Amino acid sequence: MIHRLFQTAFLCFLVLLTAPGTSPALAHDHDHSGHSGQSAHRLEEVTVTAKRLESFIQDNPQQVEVMGRDEIRERNFLDTDTAVDAMPGVSVEPSGTGLGARISIRGSGGTGRILILVNGRPAGGSQYGSAVIGDIPVSMIERIEVYKPPVPVWLGVGASSGAINIVLAPDGKADGKTRPSARFRVLGGSYGTAEATASKSMSSDNQRLQLSATGKHTDGKRGNNDRDSANISAQWEMQTPDARAYDINGRYYYSAHGNPGRDYNPTPDAEQTFQKASADFRAQGMTGDTGSYKAKLFADGVRLEDRSQTGLESTLETLGIGVKGETDWCEDTGLWSVRTGASARHETVDHTLSGDHDRRQIGLHGQFDRRLGAFSVSAGARGDWASDFDPAPGGNLGISFKPGAGRIIKAGVGYTVNIPTFGQLYQPSHGSIDQVRGNPDLDEERVISSSLGFIQKAGETGGISVTLFREDVKDLIAYQEFADTIKRPVNIADAWRCGVEINVKWQPFEQTEMNFNYIRQESENEANGEELTYTPAQKFTATVKQTLKKTDTRLEIDMEAVSERFSDLENSREKRMAGYLSVDAKIAQPLKWGGHPFELFVQVRNLFDNDFEIHHGYPNDGLRAYAGFNVAL
């Protein structure tokens, strides 16, 4: 199944690359004065998009954080996981097997539902609460958007604890700047880590194409934790003179790795092979003078082969195909806007143990935004139908107020229904039957989220924000460990989580930037009065970036402090995870090599080699160091 999907995507790219008039134009990365009108139009379209996003962040009641391509490249993130983890209030922890990651926003821990999107559509491929985003090459990311709850309805269903949208675009002349057409990265480091990445960009005045490939090997610190992985990606984009745009993206990811298991329940002979393929087509353009539309067609396929400690072999295959369309209308002066949309998706899963299952989903949404002087009001509603569950309503209401220059007050409330995932219902954890099983009797979660925030801007980049937040959940889905040491999901009648998030951005000197984020929260499982699993009472992160003027050397220190957490519903001392402090460091030195930009870098993780667990029974790998170079041609 996954091979057919990948072959189809590859044939689509082959047709596009060999189409008359496409390949020759993309063979050069130079300006063409004869088509300066199209270049200017493309630059104008990108500028309008950036200004509109900035306006949405400032004026809309929703709370959004954005990181663009320039910052991603400047900070030299080695993969998409670490780039997302660097966003304020976001935590990305690798899963026990290293396949996928557990992502939380505002300390949502192991029970919050985070919606992961790629170009505005569901990413697909998630396993047991872990989001598989390792197939996304960091070199193709245009920006990362983090929407903190309550989340606007147009993003999609299943975002009760927040949403992350990873926007992809070729690294060409999107903004009128001439960039290098090829980039390479080679690195090596602790535990036999070796990695090589190459990307090639080609562009004309109205088209862009980028190809990317990565190969990686690591032995891992623990036994049976070795991994070989690779991914290839391609993205093509075309802009027409009448303001229409089309893009196609294809990605393939492969991983063969051991599964060490928990340190108290090791599985030294368990192995897995994971494959994921994704394909996307997107069209967008203008409708009249003040309207726009977007249409997306997408597909994801996963094949997971698992050999357990007992020698039992099983196979998991999933396929998801979907379509999503949106229209956006706004008044000439921007006083109001209306956004409507619909989506449909069909998912199938076939597992050796749990059998065949499928789900068909249809969703409708509408949102109205209105400016009233210093106030902005937003109201949205959505309805979702799934073939295996009852219809699910959702909605959000928000208001923002600007009492003075650089000051914004934002308040919002939202309601959503989370349908159990296939992983929670049927699939084992990342395919590992030694650790986790599903529960086909789960009910939907019903979630009310609310927030009240105050923002004070200071200059162009500085400022402080203080946000109170709360989340109340009926029939919360959480994992309980049984006597056979296997975890299974169960419903908790009532649970809640509330707290405060403080975010500070400060630039004390021209070449120095500091970011601080602090979360203080309480949570409770009302069935037993204990804290929710993997939900820390406190978390503090700090980033300090310094550029040395004379040499352009870039330095970065990242610190993370997390209070104790509990991995079981009973909050037993045996399953307690102690709090920890971890410090990472980066240094990058730009140089010139044959007239081309060349950069040497060293990155150190867990600088002081502190012992802590990323999940219960899965210790952190301790001190690791990586060194390498980036070159642009």
Image (cartoon, grey):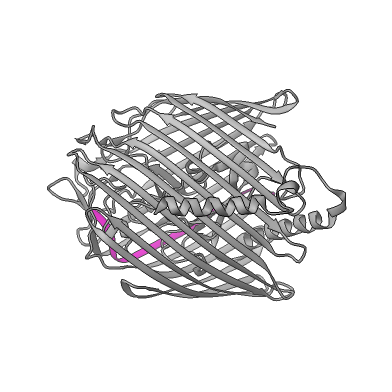
Q: Is residue 460 magenta?
A: yes
Judge from the rendering whether residue 371 lies leftward or rightward of residue 424; answer left or right. Answer: right
Q: Nearer the viewer, residue 117 or 36?
A: 36
In this rendering, would 409 be left or right of 320?
right
Residue 354 position (above or below residue 333): above
Which residues fall within the magenta stretch? Answer: 459-479
Residue 556: where, in percent of width, then height? 56, 32
Residue shown at 74% from the left, 54% from the top: 206
> Of 471 and 341, which appears nearest the observer?
341
Q: Position of residue 458 (x, y in %)?
A: 66, 50
Q: Position of residue 60 (x, y in %)?
A: 59, 66
| Position in image of residue 221 (x %, y %) | 34, 27
Q: Residue at x 62, y 42 (%)?
A: 71
Quarter of the picture containing the C terminus is top right
**Which residue occupies the foreground of this view, 19 or 218?**
19
The residue drawn where x is 33% and y is 30% is: 611
Q: Is residue 92 above or below residue 531?
A: above
What is the residue that sits farthest to the left in this orientation? 483
Q: Is residue 29 visible?
A: yes
Residue 66 in view of the camera: no
Picture quadrant where residue 372 is located? bottom right
The extreme right residue here reads 34
Q: Main secondary structure of the magenta part?
A: strand
The quadrant holding residue 554 is: top right
Where does the N terminus fall, quadrant-wise? Answer: bottom left
Q: Which residue shows up at 36% across the image and 49% down it?
A: 303
**Is residue 167 a member of the stretch shown in magenta?**
no
Is 18 above or below relative to 56?
above
Q: Is residue 101 left or right of residue 264?
A: right
Residue 194 horizontal side relative to residue 632, left or right: left
